[in-house]
Image (cartoon, helix red, strand yellow):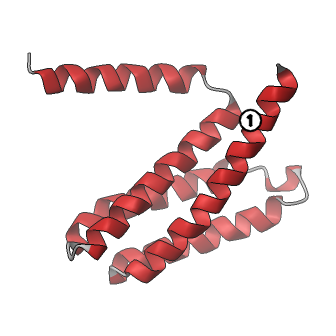
């Protein structure tokens, strides 16, 4: 077997174990981290003049935002409806960015998602310290 296949299999096993043992808050942070990674990849592709390489990461980013919105209990807390609206807006912008291969829109979405990710990460860490 090739070393790269062994390494890839190891990463997949580790990721599967991480997802299966993660708390809901940790899963949310993992989704945001992957969303940031997809947007960074799309932005880098657009910046380097390779718009076709931005397509898949932007599609995956759209899927993640749809999943975040679908799993949101908007009525469960005061900020829920606002976050649902933000997810709707982000999804629309990601679609526009992908159609137009627009780096400005992609970077706007990336900057927005980084703030959300950092906020959820802090909240997850706070939950972990309270339960410890």
Quadrant of the drawing holding the C terminus: top right
Dot 1 lies on which element?
A: helix
Q: Residues within 10 Å of mark 1 (few under 14, many from 20)?
A: some
Q: Is residue 41 above or below residue 23?
A: below
Question: Residue 131 appears at what percent x and percent y?
Answer: 84, 22
Where in the figure is residue 71, as x and y percent of width and height? 67, 47
Residue in the image at 47% along x and 47% along y: 34
Figure check: 39 above or below 11: below
Give the image quarter of residue 85.
bottom right
Residue ID for mark 1? 125
Q: Is residue 17 left or right of residue 27?
A: left
Measuring 68% from the left and 69% from the top, which residue is drawn there?
86
On screen, 103 above or below 4? below
Q: Is residue 59 visible?
A: no
Dividing the picture into quadrants, the one containing residue 80 is bottom right
In-image side of 91 versus 49 (left or right): right
């Amino acid at each position: 077997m090739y070393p790269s296949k062994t390494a890839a299999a190891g990463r997949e096993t580790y990721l599967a174990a991480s997802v299966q043992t993660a708390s809901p808050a940790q899963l949310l942070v993992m989704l945001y981290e992957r969303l940031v990674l997809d947007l960074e990849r799309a932005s880098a592709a657009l910046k380097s003049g390779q718009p076709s390489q931005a397509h898949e990461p932007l599609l995956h980013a759209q899927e993640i935002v749809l999943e975040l919105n679908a799993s949101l209990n908007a009525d469960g807390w005061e900020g829920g409806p606002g976050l649902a609206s933000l997810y709707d807006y982000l999804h629309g912008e990601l679609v526009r960015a992908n159609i137009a291969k627009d780096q400005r829109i992609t970077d706007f979405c990336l900057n927005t998602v980084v703030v959300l990710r950092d906020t959820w990460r802090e909240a997850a860490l706070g939950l972990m310290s309270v339960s410890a």
